[in-house]
Amino acid sequence: MTATLFDLTFLLIAPFWALMIFAPTWSWTRRIAESYLIVLPPVVIYVVLVVPVLPELLPLVTRPELRALAEFMSTDTGAALVWAHMIAWDLFVGRWMYLEGRRLNVHPLVMAPVLVITILLAPVGLPLFLVVRKVCDGANRGAAVVTRQ
């Protein structure tokens, strides 16, 4: 069951990423991305996996020690839990980035690689997006000043 849940974790959220990357201007993409519910599939998988091991996991996260945490994460359940956690968080962050990008009118050809990097390496994708956001926000403010004059 753990292997199946591991496999399902990404499969269930891949359509949301595909919409944000390949159909960013489609009205349904924005409607879907505006819902926090898109992160529920990996969250549900996480809960299903965590409940049986909660007594074992709780001490590991409240008093973390590298060796004990590494041992737990090296199990199938530990790896699947970490995967579901990462997938849920990456989608939550990617969803926010997509919505911010649309709000700031960041071109889809700029956002697509940023979102792909976020899927693969979210800790790199987020600061990259923050730079894009800063540049685009500054450009939008400059355009607003020119428009008002």
Image (cartoon, rainbow, N blue to C red):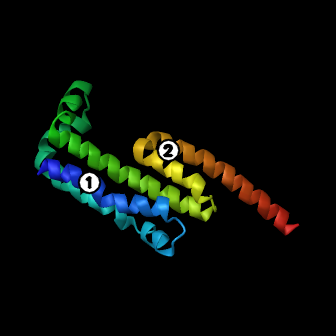
- Residue 58 visible in image: no
Give the quadrant of the C terminus: bottom right
Residue 7 in the figure: left or right of residue 104: left
In the picture, residue 77 is in which quadrant?
A: top left
What's the mark number on residue 107? none
Identify which residue is drawn at 49% across, 39% down: 124
Residue 55 in the figure: left or right of residue 102: left
In the picture, residue 105 is in which quadrant?
A: bottom right
Identify which residue is drawn at 19% across, 40% down: 78
Instruction: Give the percent coordinates (x, y) of residue 2.
Output: 14, 48
Compare residues 105 and 26 and report the one nearer the observer.
Answer: 26
Name the residue that disc number 1 marks: 9
Distance Cα–Cα, label 2 vs label 1: 20 Å
Indicate the secondary structure of the residue bearing disc 2: helix
Indicate the secondary structure of the residue bearing disc 1: helix
Compare residues 144 and 98 and report the one nearer the observer.
Answer: 98
- Most extreme residue toward the top is 67
Q: Amino acid at mark 2?
A: Gly
> How many neighbours does mark 1 have within 10 angstroms: few (below 14), some (14-19), or many (20 or more)?
many
> How many neighbours does mark 2 have within 10 angstroms: few (below 14), some (14-19), or many (20 or more)?
many
Mark closer to the chain start, 2 or 1: 1
Q: Amino acid at mark 1?
A: Thr
In the picture, residue 102 is in which quadrant?
A: bottom right
Instruction: Give the percent coordinates (x, y) of residue 76.
Output: 16, 40
90 w.r.t. 30: above or below: above
Name the residue that disc number 2 marks: 125
The image shows a total of numbered marks equal to 2
Compare residues 39 and 1 and report the one nearer the observer.
Answer: 1
